[in-house]
Image (cartoon, rainbow, N blue to C red):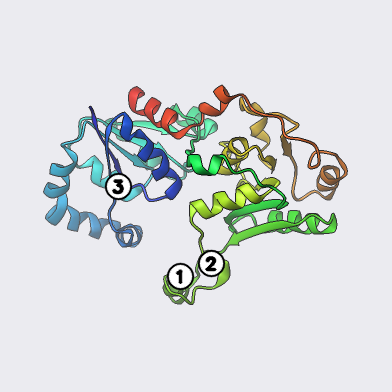
Amino acid sequence: MNKVCFFGWYEDYERLSIDSLKEIYEVEIINLPKMLLKLHARFPYLLLFIFRVFFRSLLSKKLSKFDHVLISDNALYFDILSRCSANKKTMIIRNVIKNSCLLNNSDFSYFSFDESDSKKYALNYYNQFLNVPDTLLTEQSGGGGGYFLGLGKNRINEVNAIEKATKENAICSKIILIRKPLGVYEKILLRSRWCPADMQRISYVENLCNVIRADFLIEVVNPGQSGITLRALESIMFNKKLVTNNSEIINYSFYNPENIRVVDFNCNKSLLDLFESDFLSSGYKDVDERVINEYNGTFVLNKIIANS
């Protein structure tokens, strides 16, 4: 059984998919303290110097025992793995590419979920992925109206517009718009019991419970993003309708206009058309299980490992 290391993977939803691979590979997740990521962002050369002097041999020895090491698009983990020996090195890019300097190492195989980035930088393309606990898949409650979860950056106007429109049409909605902390004081509060409500994170399982209770999901993508988000995958896995501003979603295999409505959140007419139509009140059309499986975390990650 091949030994596979996921180096620097913190998110709950990613770990659910990684854990599912343990029936296929000998899998281990190795994470550095999150504080090091913040220090690297401020003092990259100092942290690399400390790593080279004190930790390089230790980490190199640990990582070299694996047949394959996979990282996300994190600069610190890229810097470390670039200087370590490993049989196979793969970067799974989880965001729209902003720093192409991470793409310059020929020792790595690169995979991007964003089709336009894949074409622009000649990278391997992979489907966004998600694994959902079986216990949650059997629960289909609904009745909770619309649901949005996301960071406020570049989305506040759009989210406010859809929230206002749902209220005007007597449709309940649960909007969780998370604000990033500003300054040192708020960053300290973030880790305390006095954290302001608009900065509080929720666990991924709690998010899935909110998805289950919802009738439809709201997705607001940032300008320039063409890859699909977790909201889109949650919608097909839990049979929830999706309202999104991602016009590229019509090109995906699971797209059905009876399940997914593309709107312009900044256009009153677009929102008016949404609520005057029978889109939200009509039934959900089931997506073929073979199509859903294309976005299953076990399937996608196993395919990445096999093709690296």
Discs 3, 1 touching: Cβ within 8 Å: no
Q: Earlier in the sequence, mark 3 or mark 2?
A: 3
Name above or below for residue 174 compared with residue 297: below
Query: Circle 3 sits in a helix, a strand or a loop, which is it?
Result: helix
Discs 3, 2 touching: Cβ within 8 Å: no
Please, what is the three-letter code of the amino acid marked with disc 3?
Tyr
Residue 121 x %, y %: 45, 31
Say which residue label 1 marks.
Answer: 190
Residue 204 in view: yes
Quadrant assignment, res 263: top right
Query: Circle 1 sits in a helix, a strand or a loop, which is it?
Result: helix
Q: CA distance from mark 3 to mark 2?
A: 27 Å
Discs 2, 1 touching: Cβ within 8 Å: yes
Q: Earlier in the sequence, mark 3 or mark 1?
A: 3
Say which residue label 3 marks.
Answer: 77
Query: Which residue lies at the image location 62% right of the left edge and 39% below the top edge?
Result: 235
Q: Is residue 170 left or right of residue 246?
A: right
Query: Circle 2 sits in a helix, a strand or a loop, which is it?
Result: helix
Say which residue label 2 marks.
Answer: 199
Please, what is the three-letter code of the amino acid marked with disc 1?
Leu
Q: Is residue 72 left or right of residue 96?
A: left
- The front one of 247 and 99 is 247
- Circle 3 residues within 10 Å: few <14, some 14–19, many ≥20: some
- Circle 1 residues within 10 Å: few <14, some 14–19, many ≥20: some
Residue 308 in view: no
Q: CA distance from mark 3 to mark 1?
A: 24 Å
